[in-house]
Amino acid sequence: MACCVAAAAHKKLPLWKYLSQLAETTPCLPVPCMNIINGGKHAGNLLAPQEFMIAPIQAKDMKEAMKWGMEVYNELKKLLKKNFGIGAVAVGDEGGFAPNVVDMEEPLKQIM
Protein backbone atom coordinates (compact mmCIF):
# COMPACT_ATOMS: atom_id res chain seq x y z
CA MET A 1 0.00 0.00 0.00
CA ALA A 2 2.85 2.37 0.84
CA CYS A 3 4.28 1.83 -2.66
CA CYS A 4 0.91 2.67 -4.24
CA VAL A 5 0.60 5.82 -2.15
CA ALA A 6 4.14 6.86 -3.13
CA ALA A 7 3.54 6.11 -6.84
CA ALA A 8 0.26 8.07 -6.81
CA ALA A 9 2.01 11.02 -5.17
CA HIS A 10 4.82 10.83 -7.72
CA LYS A 11 2.28 10.94 -10.56
CA LYS A 12 0.34 13.69 -8.73
CA LEU A 13 -2.83 11.58 -8.77
CA PRO A 14 -5.33 10.75 -6.05
CA LEU A 15 -4.76 7.18 -4.82
CA TRP A 16 -8.12 5.95 -6.14
CA LYS A 17 -7.34 7.26 -9.64
CA TYR A 18 -3.87 5.68 -9.62
CA LEU A 19 -5.35 2.32 -8.54
CA SER A 20 -7.94 2.58 -11.33
CA GLN A 21 -5.10 3.02 -13.83
CA LEU A 22 -3.31 -0.01 -12.42
CA ALA A 23 -6.48 -2.07 -12.72
CA GLU A 24 -7.12 -0.69 -16.21
CA THR A 25 -10.66 0.32 -15.28
CA THR A 26 -12.61 3.50 -15.81
CA PRO A 27 -11.98 5.79 -12.85
CA CYS A 28 -14.96 6.21 -10.59
CA LEU A 29 -15.55 7.90 -7.30
CA PRO A 30 -15.66 5.81 -4.14
CA VAL A 31 -19.18 4.87 -3.04
CA PRO A 32 -20.10 4.95 0.64
CA CYS A 33 -21.58 1.77 2.08
CA MET A 34 -24.05 2.51 4.85
CA ASN A 35 -25.09 0.14 7.58
CA ILE A 36 -28.83 0.58 8.07
CA ILE A 37 -29.88 -2.58 9.95
CA ASN A 38 -27.75 -4.46 12.47
CA GLY A 39 -27.90 -8.12 13.36
CA GLY A 40 -25.45 -10.63 14.74
CA LYS A 41 -24.44 -11.27 18.33
CA HIS A 42 -23.81 -7.65 19.30
CA ALA A 43 -27.12 -6.23 17.97
CA GLY A 44 -29.40 -7.60 20.67
CA ASN A 45 -31.75 -9.27 18.21
CA LEU A 46 -31.93 -12.70 16.56
CA LEU A 47 -30.91 -11.72 13.02
CA ALA A 48 -28.02 -13.88 11.81
CA PRO A 49 -26.50 -11.41 9.29
CA GLN A 50 -24.41 -8.81 11.07
CA GLU A 51 -25.22 -5.94 8.72
CA PHE A 52 -27.72 -4.94 6.08
CA MET A 53 -26.11 -2.20 4.01
CA ILE A 54 -26.91 0.09 1.11
CA ALA A 55 -24.54 1.66 -1.43
CA PRO A 56 -25.95 4.51 -3.56
CA ILE A 57 -24.00 3.56 -6.70
CA GLN A 58 -25.99 5.79 -9.07
CA ALA A 59 -25.24 9.03 -7.21
CA LYS A 60 -23.32 11.62 -9.22
CA ASP A 61 -21.11 12.68 -6.32
CA MET A 62 -20.44 12.03 -2.62
CA LYS A 63 -22.86 14.75 -1.48
CA GLU A 64 -25.72 13.15 -3.40
CA ALA A 65 -24.76 9.67 -2.20
CA MET A 66 -24.80 10.79 1.43
CA LYS A 67 -28.12 12.60 0.91
CA TRP A 68 -29.70 9.47 -0.57
CA GLY A 69 -28.33 7.35 2.27
CA MET A 70 -29.74 9.75 4.85
CA GLU A 71 -33.13 9.75 3.13
CA VAL A 72 -33.28 5.94 3.04
CA TYR A 73 -32.20 5.75 6.70
CA ASN A 74 -34.88 8.23 7.81
CA GLU A 75 -37.65 6.54 5.79
CA LEU A 76 -36.59 3.13 7.11
CA LYS A 77 -36.81 4.49 10.66
CA LYS A 78 -40.41 5.58 10.04
CA LEU A 79 -41.33 2.18 8.55
CA LEU A 80 -39.70 0.15 11.32
CA LYS A 81 -41.38 2.25 14.01
CA LYS A 82 -44.77 1.93 12.30
CA ASN A 83 -44.48 -1.82 11.65
CA PHE A 84 -42.64 -3.03 14.78
CA GLY A 85 -42.93 -0.30 17.41
CA ILE A 86 -40.53 2.13 19.04
CA GLY A 87 -38.08 -0.61 20.07
CA ALA A 88 -37.37 -1.39 16.41
CA VAL A 89 -35.63 1.93 15.90
CA ALA A 90 -33.07 1.38 18.64
CA VAL A 91 -29.66 1.95 17.07
CA GLY A 92 -27.06 -0.81 17.29
CA ASP A 93 -23.34 -0.53 18.01
CA GLU A 94 -22.52 0.21 14.38
CA GLY A 95 -25.21 2.80 13.65
CA GLY A 96 -27.90 0.65 12.05
CA PHE A 97 -31.31 -0.07 13.50
CA ALA A 98 -31.68 -3.29 15.46
CA PRO A 99 -35.30 -4.42 15.09
CA ASN A 100 -36.31 -7.49 17.08
CA VAL A 101 -37.15 -9.72 14.10
CA VAL A 102 -36.06 -13.29 13.38
CA ASP A 103 -36.86 -13.71 9.69
CA MET A 104 -33.80 -12.71 7.66
CA GLU A 105 -36.01 -11.58 4.78
CA GLU A 106 -37.96 -9.08 6.89
CA PRO A 107 -35.17 -6.44 6.92
CA LEU A 108 -34.89 -6.79 3.14
CA LYS A 109 -38.64 -6.27 2.76
CA GLN A 110 -38.48 -3.18 4.95
CA ILE A 111 -35.51 -1.76 3.04
CA MET A 112 -37.23 -2.30 -0.30
Image (cartoon, rainbow, N blue to C red):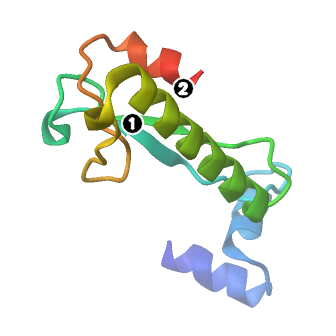
For numbered disc 2, what is the local secondary structure?
Answer: helix
For numbered disc 1, what is the local secondary structure?
Answer: strand
Give percent across and percent down for residue 91: 31, 48
Q: Which residue is mark 2?
A: 111
Q: Residue at x 60, y 74 (%)?
A: 4
Q: Is residue 51 left or right of residue 8?
A: left
Q: Residue at x 45, y 41 (%)?
A: 36
Image quadrant in which you'd find residue 27: bottom right
Residue 109 sits above or below residue 42 on the image:
above
Give percent across and percent down for residue 13: 78, 80
Name the kind of residue labelled 2 in the image.
Answer: Ile
Quarter of the image containing the C terminus? top right
Q: Residue at x 86, y 50 (%)?
A: 26
Residue 18 sits above or below residue 54 on the image:
below
Q: Is residue 29 left or right of residue 83?
A: right
Q: 9 or 100, which is in the foreground? A: 100
- In three-dimensional space, the C-alpha distance between marks 1 and 2, rounded to whole angstroms, equals 9 Å
Q: Which residue is mark 1?
A: 37
Q: Is residue 8 left or right of residue 36?
A: right
Q: Residue at x 67, y 81 (%)?
A: 7
Crowding around mark 2 (Cα neighbors within 10 Å: few <14, some 14 to 19, many 20+) is: some
Q: Are marks 1 and 2 in contact (CB under 8 Å)?
A: yes
Q: 24 or 15, which is in the foreground? A: 15
Give percent across and percent down for residue 10: 73, 89
Name the kind of residue labelled 1 in the image.
Answer: Ile
1 or 2: tag closer to the N-terminus: 1
Q: 20 or 7, which is in the foreground? A: 20
